[in-house]
Amino acid sequence: MTLKENAQKGQITDWMEKAAQTERVSVNRLCEQIAAGEVIVPRNKNHALENPVAIGRGLRTKINANIGTSTDASDISIEVEKARIAVRAGADAIMDLSTGGNLAEIRRTIMQEVPAVIGTVPVYQAAIHAAKNKGGLIHMTDDDLFGVLEEQAEEGVDFFTVHCGVTLHSIERLKKEGRLTDIVSRGGSFLTTWMIANDRENPLYEQYDRLLDIAAAYDITLSLGDGLRPGSLADATDRAQIDELIILGELTEEAWKRGVQVMIEGPGHVPLNQIEMNITLQKRICHQAPFYVLGPLVTDVAPGYDHITSAIGGAIAASAGADFLCYVTPGEHLKLPDLHEVHQGVIASRIAAHAGDIAKGLPGAMEWDISMAKARKALDWDTQFRLAVDPDYARRIREENAPGSEQVCTMCGEYCAIQLVNEILKK
């Protein structure tokens, strides 16, 4: 029986109890939300996770970190270290998006070495295997794709990104739309290429029941991917994006009937004034299923700083109801991130998520900031470091620029506003 099936029958499990304790919410309410599809707790029955990660309405906004090799860089040890750094920095989940080297070995090593919720995009492995062994990704068969899904399910992958909403109809819609950047999703591009070359429907859509069989058997969460997400501000919230979203809403209901947990992936590149509308649309069309957004990035012109553009959008998205933020690193659009950039990406997303949680009034969110404010008033530097979102970095900055007096910082020196006012109010 899947976790969702337990919840649908009102049966509270130990995993639900543990998740409720972590989130500081009522376990009965959490069970109801899992049953309704508003909350997911991804865990493959073959993955021995220690700590649950609950994602959804009324819960702390969670963070995912993407790692993975490419055809130009495929060092397993580096990817494992990226995953470790991401988890230490506060990521709640890791997605392995590897496309270079031995994909199965990379994935298995990461899962063995890093205790975290793990997600993948199975079509990568299936398409790349076909390209290497059959002369092109267009020669991938249905059995190739579903064989990879079964393989990764057996290994313990907790959630799959599956681009089920990229259909022949939605591709026609996209072509009529006349986008600037067409399709920027790698999984979406693989499937679109295959569909057009073979003049066939997307197997993940056409054989959705087959996908649900695998997901239900291993209790895998489906992350219904946004293969037609906008890759530029000019393409945001267009007919192709919304057409795919409507399909995903329909597929969500089908998954729930089978006891399969679902989250919905969202854009992408979105102007500030369209972010809240996108969240509202998704929640309405997909029946309040948890929303997992990449960023969103609020401008296209900041390569090298896209951890900032995505944090701006992520804060607005989280405050409007997004439940899961996929980090973006400074190297987005330029290169694979290095270890430092992975850390930067997670921290930027955590700041965005926390800002959103404050706006949503989540229990404990504002209390963290109140504690920091009290420590600042007291010029209690050790407590400030302990409360900081990145304690080691905050402490290093302070120590590298320490003034003669340990009580103040070099911003104001002896004219520290807090110190002056503390002294005069005492008098």
Image: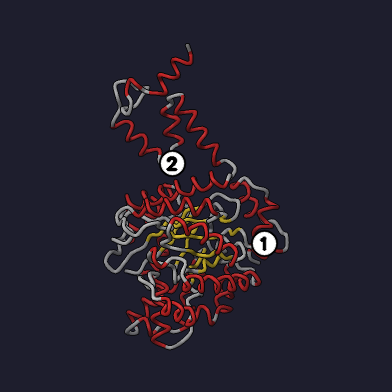
Q: Is residue 202 visible?
A: no
Q: In the image, is residue 218 above or below residue 50?
A: below
Q: Is residue 206 at least partly visible in the picture?
A: yes
- Which residue is farthest front? 273
Q: Amino acid at mark 2?
A: Val
Which mark, residue 291? none
Q: In the picture, which quadrant includes the N terminus?
A: bottom right
> Which structural element holds mark 2?
loop
Q: Which mark is residue 35?
A: 1
Q: Residue at x 38, y 60 (%)?
A: 67
- Of pointers 2 and 1, the one earlier in the residue sequence: 1
Question: What residue is rendered at 35% in x and 55% in y?
Answer: 306
Residue 18 at x, y percent in the picture: 62, 50
Q: In this image, 283 relative to 97: left or right?
A: right
- Viewer-proximal residue among 257 and 306: 306
- Image location (x, y in percent) of residue 408: 36, 24
Q: Which residue is mark 2?
A: 389
Disc 1 residue type (three-letter): Ala
Viewer-side residue, 82 vs 289: 289
Tell which residue pokes out farthest to the right in this image: 10
Total marks placed: 2
Verify CB contact (< 8 Å) between mark 2 and mark 1.
Answer: no
Q: Residues within 10 Å of mark 2 (few under 14, many from 20)?
A: some
Residue at the image position 39 percent from the left and 76 percent from the top: 178
Which structural element holds mark 1? helix
- Up the image or down, 403 lies above or below 189; here it is above
Q: Quadrant of residue 73?
A: bottom left
Mark-to-mark CA distance, 2 and 1: 33 Å
Residue 92 versus residue 129 in the image, above or below: above
Q: Is residue 162 left or right of residue 104?
A: right
